[in-house]
Amino acid sequence: MKREHKHRPVLKFILSAIVALGGLFLLQRLLVPKYVDGIVEGAFVAEYYKEEKDFDVIFIGDCEVYENFSPIVLWEQYGINSYIRGSAEQYIWQSYYLLEDTLRYETPEVVIFNIQSLQFDVSQNEAYNRMTLEGMEWSPAKVKAILASMKPGEKFLDYVFPILRYHSRWSELESTDLRYLFDTKKVSHNGYYMRVDVRPAENVPEGRILADYSFGENAWKYLDMMTELCEEKGIELILIKAPSLYPYWYEEWEVQVEDYAAEHNLKYINFLELTEEVGIDYSLDTYDAGLHMNLSGAEKLASWLGNFLKEEIGLLDRRGEEALAASWKEKIADYEAEKQAQYEKYGMTGEK
């Protein structure tokens, strides 16, 4: 009896600690943004971990990949199994560490990187940092990504314990914060963000004159690291520039990328120069005046890219693989259902 009495304070302490930690965990889950409505881009990175990881092609980059290419079309037309590891204003060091993270699970045949982010040599915005980094599972790659991304004033512990950053978010809580306390709904299609509405590109502004058109040392460093990592793993790295009309893509930037691709024997595709061949119509194929493609534009780009991957890279058609085809059948059904829901939302009768 005395021994039982002696251990009772220890048991009480352990129980109290468990209750306190459980309460903090629940509070953190409640306060962290869920990204299921409105700004959904913060959910994209995390969705990858729920996938069967056997992709032929991995896209990495910012909105110029996740809004401009449809993996569904790559599968339906060419049997190419692909995924977009994109996020809003994804900086090149984040793209690199997302690639490192991806290689913990699989080694794709092709990595496609959109080079718009070369313009940034340091992180510009904490909110964008968090929309990329918080969705990553913990690994050395995530730790390095956080350390490479933090702006002055940001703290590493705020990423380890997000409640330290979001503790004052009480006034912003919505019903979705409770509904998706432990799980969340899927908001992308293999990383692709769908929009079917149309807003033609008109009066697109010209680029302002810059004092220096050179990409920064930090940006070049991470592109070198990406190139070296892909070479080491036997991955074909393809650089692309999506056909987004804005932010402006300068000729001086183009020359630097062309020279880099030539020096490192990389394929580089500038879709701004291929709009006629692809069939892009800026009066129909963009939902925000030329910044990003809508569904019809994304499907056209994927169709062209799939043919390139088949003819120039030699990727094989995997539609004959029973389990993979069954998985894609479900994904196509979800894709078509959202397409129809969006047509109804925007008062559209069907495909353009």
Image (cartoon, helix red, strand yellow):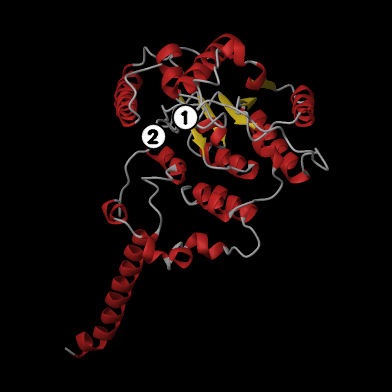
- Residue receiving disc 1: 83
Question: Where does the C terminus fall, quadrant-wise?
Answer: top left
User: Which residue is at 36% across, 45% downward?
Assistant: 36
- Residue receiving disc 2: 51
Q: Nearer the viewer, residue 255 or 233?
A: 255
Q: Nearer the viewer, residue 53 or 122?
A: 122
- Counting other residues with Cα less than 10 Å from the Cα at mark 2, is it few (<14), some (14-19), or many (20 or more)? few
x, y percent for residue 193: 44, 33
Residue 186 is labelled as none
Tell me the amino acid under the disc marked 2: Glu
Q: Are dots 1 and 2 in contact, CB under 8 Å?
A: yes
Q: Quadrant of residue 216?
A: top right
x, y percent for residue 86: 52, 37
Q: Inspect this view and state whether residue 107 appears.
A: no
Per the image, label 2 sits on a secondary structure element best described as loop
- Counting other residues with Cα less than 10 Å from the Cα at mark 1, is it few (<14), some (14-19), or many (20 or more)? many
Tell me the amino acid under the disc marked 1: Tyr
